[in-house]
Structure formats: C-alpha cells, structure tokens
Amino acid sequence: MEDVMEGTEPDYLCTPEQALHDVAHAETPVLVDFDETLCLRNSTEEFIDQAMFGLLAAVLLRVLEITKPWRWTGGEPTRDVWRIRVILYTMPWQWSRWRRFVQRRGPEMLNRPLSDALRQSRGRVVVASIGFEPIIRPLLEAMGWGDAELIACSLSGFDDRARGKLALVQSRLGAEVVAQSLVVTDSRSDAPLLAAAAQGQLVDWPDALYMPALRRVYLPFDYTTKVKRPGAKYLRRSILLDDFMYWLLATIALTNAPVLHVIGLGCLLVSFWAIYETGYVDNDRCGELYESTPKLSRQYATHMVATPRWQPWLWSLSLGVAGIALLRPDGELVRITAVWVLALLALHALFRIYNRVDYSTRVWLLYVLQLARASACLLVVPANLPGAMALIVQAICRWIPYYIHRNFGLKWAQPRMLVGRVVLYAGAVALLFIVDPFGPVWTWTTLAVLAFGIFKARHEFAEVVREASRLNDPKAGTTKG
C-alpha cells in the first residue's frame, strides 16, 4: 500500500462496509480506482513480474533505479513508464505472456464485494487509474469487466503520469462530472481527486496486497537498498561513490590497463558486497530475535526481498573470479582466488559473531568489518602508500560515529566525518612529508584522494566556514566555558 500523503483529509477515510453500501446505492457517477481497489493487486508490478527472464529484468530495473532517467521526464510519477518500456523493449513477447497470465489469474484478483456493489449502482461506473491502459484492459476483461469505461495512462508518452490522476480524469470526463462523483480509492496520492469530487472515500481493502515485481529474484544490493538502507541513495553515495571510488583511487596508479582495472574492481565490489549484505540480513534477524529494542527499518516488516542462502555465494564466486582474472592476468588466478574465498568466509564468520555478541564487544568488531570493507581490494591488487592510507582513514572515520554512539550514548550520526577524513588524511600526508620529503607521498594518488575528499566534503566545509566566529563576537552567542 502507498504511504499516507501529508494533508490527506481524515474525513475521506472510510471502512470497506461503508464504501460498499454507498457504492451500491449511488445514483451519481462512481469513479473507482483499479490497483488494490477493484483489483486486489498492482497491475504494473504484476506485469513486470511476468517477465520471462526475471534476472535480466531485475538487472535492467536496478540500472534504472541508479540512473533515474525519469528526472528528465517529469520526476518520480513517470518512473513506471520507464520500467514498463525497458521490459517491452528487451522482451517484446511480454504482451502475449501477460494475456495468458490474466486469463488464468485475473479472476482471482477481482475485489468481488466491490464488484458486486458496482453492479448494483445506478450511476455511471468509471474505472479511473494512474496505471496503464494496455495492461489494465485485458485484466478487466478477465475479471468480467471488459465493457467498463476505463480512464488510464498511455505508454506512448509521459504526460499522463506527469500531470496526475485528477488532470487525467478531468480531461476525459470534465470537471463538472468529477464534481458530482463518488470516488473510491485506496491511494493517498489521490487526495486532489478526492477533494474535487462530491464524495471521496479512502478505503484500505483487507484482501488487497501490494506485491513488488520480481520479488523472488535475488540481486546483490537488493536487501541493502530496499530494507537495510532504503533508497538508491545509499548505493550511489556510500558504495559506488565511496567504497568503489576509494578502491579505485588507491590502486589505479599501479595498473597499465585502467579500463580493465575499473571493470575488474567493479566485479570485485559486487563479489564482496554479496557476502557483506548477508551479514546485514543476519543482523536484522538476530535483532528481531534477541534484542529488546532492535533497530529495524520500517521496510523490514513490509518489503518482500529475496534472501536465499546460496545464491549470494554463487554471485560472489563467479564475479570474484571474473574480477581477479581482469585484475591479475599474470597466471596467479588460482592462488589469489583461494585467498579471496578464504577472506569472504572469514568476513561471513565475523559478521555472524558480530551479530550475536553484546554492544560493547561489537564496537571493536565493527572496526574490523569497516577495515575489511575499505581495504578488501588489497587482497587482489596492490596500492601505493598514499592509497593505503586513504583506505585506513576511510575505515576509521566510518567507525568513529559508532564508537561515540555506543560508548557515550549519543545519537548515531555523521558528525562531519567527511571533513574529518580530509583532515586526518592531510595530517598523515604531512607527517610522511616531514619524515621523508622526497618519499612516496609525492604521487598523483595523494592529490587525487585529497581533491576527491574535498569535493565530497564541500558542503560540510561550507558549514564549518559559516559557523566559524571569534569568541568575543557578541553575535556568536558564545559563553565562557
């Protein structure tokens, strides 16, 4: 179900029993929502879920979630247009699969009490959905509503989704008809339509269930981005633009094949995270079982994500071998692969221990986990001294907030640790320069790490500068201490 939209009038909330009574006795037009209302599932998600090559579809949709091309076509409302088009462009036979599926399963998805009430209504019945007409129409036919008047979005453009449901309905029916209508929907996003209607009813149907597409398909990072750290922002900022970029900056100066190096490190990153993520899964499950106040995201109880036992290892081993072959084409594939596998086994074991010990012990184990996350690539490729220092600083700065949180009871936040990274790294570089002015500190890696760190911390640096003031400045509001 969709989250409650701020500002939705509580007067629209209605029980299923009251909605069925009002619909059955309606003499005005009835505008009924489709997904999770007349249909007890989400038609868009069900359509994508029928993709023949589920793994390919999941990978393509993951790429979309990272790149977010809908930013240029009207924002988040147009996201599903991109998702459907990608499936159709890569699997054009999807329409025939969909028709066979709805003929077989469509009747099961019908909200029969609501359907019966609509049949009794004396008013004009219109199915109004922000879903897609080519997907919904065959499903309506399978449900016995093939002759229903349908207002839904087109797949040929982005305007229908970008304008919203109220504009879509008013463009087809006119504002006057909408103003006379009874609207029945489960979607909090339909608040403008509810407000424009003569009577609006916001109903959560007990048998309706939002089932995300491809929920049975495992992909690395799925649990992280959908449950542990919901949203694609963590994947982009903390894994790709942090873990991967520092791996790259620390090691690329010593390679003669930079393109293969980047691809190989990418394979190695996914290989590592496939196992690291199983630690997240185990951490949440242990928290639910053993902790009195577990720190679980809201999505832990509601989001359906595949967490198989062996598939992460298959992904990890296959991509690990591929990454090692690209990074070390010197005949040491077997030896380095054995080292990598042993390291992954040790990581898995360490996470299992970490998830089952007390908080005071976890403080020290977390540093080891963060050090492994920051520097695992060094098991396969070498780094120069400034690069290795950058990885150590990265691990320390990720560990410090947890140390503060567990030892001092303060909120687990990021107290400008991006600035802290730059300061710590610059200090270490300065000490190396003092010890050996002409030593290994003078490399492009040092400059690249500092430049990238300053760029990432630019907003924090700006805050530091804005808040800086003299102790005797009366405007600063400081007191003696």
Image (cartoon, rainbow, N blue to C red):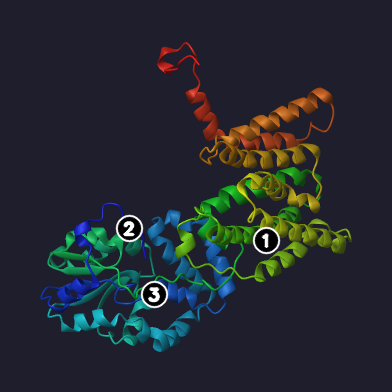
Quarter where residue 122 is shown: bottom left
Q: State the mark number for residue 275.
A: 1
Kind of residue at disc 3: Ser
Residue identifier under label 2: 4
Secondary structure under the numbered disc 1 in the rendered image: helix
Looking at the rendered structure, the secondary structure element under dot 2 is: loop
Of residues 145 and 299, the one nearer the viewer is 299
Mark 1 vs mark 3: give the one in front.
1
Crowding around mark 3 (Cα neighbors within 10 Å: few <14, some 14 to 19, many 20+) is many
Q: Tell me if I can see residue 9 in this picture.
A: yes
Give the Cα separation between the discs numbered 2 and 1: 35 Å
- 261 in relation to 422, above or below: below
Q: Is residue 303 left or right of residue 202?
A: right
Say above or below: 102 vs 17: below
Q: Locate the N terminus by quadrant.
A: bottom left
Amino acid type shown at disc 1: Ile
Identified at 55% across, 39% down, the residue is 414
Residue occupying the point 75% across, 38% down: 389
Q: Residue at x 40, y 16 (%)?
A: 475
Give the mark, 2 or 3, whose residue is nearer the N terminus: 2
How far apart, in angstroms, are the residues tagged by discs 1 and 3? 34 Å
Whether tag 2 and tag 1 are in contact, CB under 8 A, the answer is no
> What is the CA distance from the residue labelled 2 to the residue labelled 3?
20 Å
Left or right of 378 on screen, residue 167: left
SS at mark 3 in the image: helix
Amino acid marked by disc 2: Val
Q: Nearer the viewer, mark 2 or mark 3?
A: 2
Instruction: List the residue tagged with mark 3.
Output: 43
Quadrant of residue 448 in the image?
top right
